[in-house]
Image (cartoon, rainbow, N blue to C red):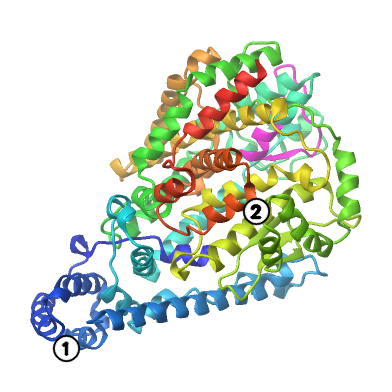
Amino acid sequence: MKGIITVFLLASVMISGSALARPDWMKDSISNLEKELTGKYGAEQSARLVKGMDQVAGFWREEDGDAEVFEEFVRVNFAGDEKTLDDLFNRWEFLLESIYGHMNEIRMAMGRYADLDIGPMYAIDRVTASYSASAHIADDFFSNKLAFTVLLNFPLTTLEERLTDGEGWTRRQWADVRLAQWFSRRVPSSVNLELAKASAASDQYIADYNIWMHHLLNDKGERLFPPKMRLLSHWNLRDQIKADYGNSEGGLERQRMIQKVMERIVDQTIPEIVVNNPHVDWNPYSNEVWPAGVNDSDSEPPAGMKVSGDREPDTRYSIWFNTFKASTLVDKYSPTAPTLIARRFNEEREIPEEQVENMLVQVCSSPLVKQISEMAKKKLGRDLEPFDIWYNGFRSMGKYSEPELDKVARGKYPTAKDFEKDIERMLVALDFPADRAEYLAGKILVEPARGSGHAAGSGMCSAPARLRTRVGEEGMDYKGFNIAVHEMGHNVEQVLSLCDVDYYVLQGVPNVAFTEAFAFVFQGNDIMLLELEQDKGGRAEAMSTINDFWMTVEIGAVSLIDMKAWRWMYEHPDATPAEFKAAVILFSKEVWNTYFADIFGKKDVTILAVYSHMVHSFLYLPDYAIGHMIAFQVKEQMREAGNIGVEFERMAIAGRIAPDLWMKNATGKRVSADALIEATERALKELD
Ligand SMILES: [Zn+2]
């Protein structure tokens, strides 16, 4: 559901600044209609009428009709009194829930055999899963003018208005604003197609960017990694660095080698031929390459393969830059958010760019970073090296071993249905009142997933939220249970914020970070939900807080580079990939030198720019960082209130209002990094 709605919520447009030219007759038509309809409905309707006509005019295209069609449309569809306006509003509430609720059910049905582990998969299953019945609704609703009836009667707003005036709005005023946003953008399908192409190309580039680790040689010609090990950049490379902290034999040398590989990906000195290719050996230090056989390996190069050390020709930056180019095509259809940056911050996150940047800087520049790095140094017994930005040793061993936990989980949940039957008990254990636990459990359907699991919310209250979870042949293991509990948090939020929010158009949470916060709260109580004794507070929790803080610092710094890169592209729309590369390298060094050079004792490090999201995710990275901060705000509130269930429900039913407003309602404070920082300070004291 979220996916479908997002398409419609991408833009909030004040029409007066529209970049699209209006037909000559429009001005006269509007002033004639103003006189005519103000006479009919009274002067008090005039401001609303003028704004509505202006909004319609901003989206009107030649094919929508001439002056006569426009004037007739306004005459027939302007709601001149409160009663008519309410009737219109209520119809849209009903229609949107029906349309998107059923569209979501169609999507679930079409994806059923691809998503669920209920027998073999056939070729047809992939095709049905990729079909989207709702793809053309936006176009349809503009061409039959339904979208214009909304734009004529309900106000489009800017982020600034929503943030400054929004606090004084009634719930219904918020609902009016969200209804208008549903139709706040009319991007031609040719532009959407270009965007989809650039996005697919970048996805493909990232999905195939593997490094064959056994084929890496050090200066002594030794292979540090086992045969067949293939690591996807950057996720697997980063996770291998983390895994090698547990390898006292050659872990450190491996970590250094991965760092070198990352540097070469970032500066594109990596030989093009080694990417996703098991037929060549490579020394990332000297940057020499050989056919794999020469160095005594099992993978002979195919006949005719020419082994050359030519570097990757800045492909990474050209693909990334193309996502920017495609994004700029949307700009002129989005007059008050005329950049992808504005759309990301003002319309999707609804937290201004400056506020997000301040939050990231606050965390990265906190003196806590230094303190925690000292802890890491002590634990490692050596000075820090740049890759230690991914240090993951801030954990204390739990009471139970993983095999023990597997046994308990498998015993409780041989099938997905057994998990479903247990939801009500788990919700009561999480402090939901008995009747609410029963109600919520009744709206969650648990199904066996092919993948690792996900929570698929419903689009209408009469349909269930779906918890998809992985159950092995021997039952659900602990890892599966831990994820299922996380998804259950999403499902409970989905049910409450759909069925218990007062208006359908206000359903949901302000942005994705908020639903993750709820899911993390559930997940953090997983041991208790297995009816085992969970360490509450104390050392274990302190360590996990410190781990979260360190991760937020890392992803916060990465986000700052991503933000600088997008600003630079907008300032240099005609740049070459090589120029863009130089800029990104400069930003990586700047960010590193500002926050980490002293702590790590090394300057000009570039590895933070290795994140694949930068290349294919259109400035998504800051969501991860603010997600951690929002999770802490929510968690701290529940800790202070001493009650998860009641607080959860109180927070969730605020629906999709502005993030700061939501957070003030939830915790008394706006969205900020303070809760994370305070919790980390407390954790450090606890460990002292
Ligand atoms: Zn999640």
Query: Is residue 650 positioned above or below 612 on the image?
Result: below
Of 639 and 610, the residue lying toward us:
639
Where, by quadrant of the figure, is residue 262 drawn?
top right
**Tag 1's secondary structure?**
helix
Q: Is residue 34 left or right of residue 496?
A: left
**Tag 2's secondary structure?**
helix
Of 567 and 210, the residue lying toward us:
567
Gap between marks 1 and 2 measured at Cα: 53 Å
Across and down, in percent, residue 174 comes to: 36, 63
Q: Is residue 245 left or right of residue 26?
A: right
Across and down, in percent, residue 561 comes to: 44, 34
Q: Residue at x 81, y 69 (%)?
A: 118
Residue 324 is a magenta residue: no
What amino acid is found at the position of numbered circle 1 in the picture? Glu
Q: Which mark is residue 602?
A: none
Across and down, in percent, residue 280 comes to: 70, 35
Where, by quadrant of the figure, is residue 101 drawn?
bottom right
Q: If you read the primary sequence from the N terminus, does the residue marked by circle 1 or circle 2 appear first?
A: 1
Within 10 angstroms of label 2, few (less than 14), some, or many (20 or more) residues?
many
Of 437 and 367, the residue lying toward us:
437
- Magenta stretch? 216-241
Q: Residue at x 61, y 34 (%)?
A: 308
Query: Is residue 572 positioned above or below 511 on the image?
Result: above
Mark 1, residue position: 68
Mark 2, residue position: 489
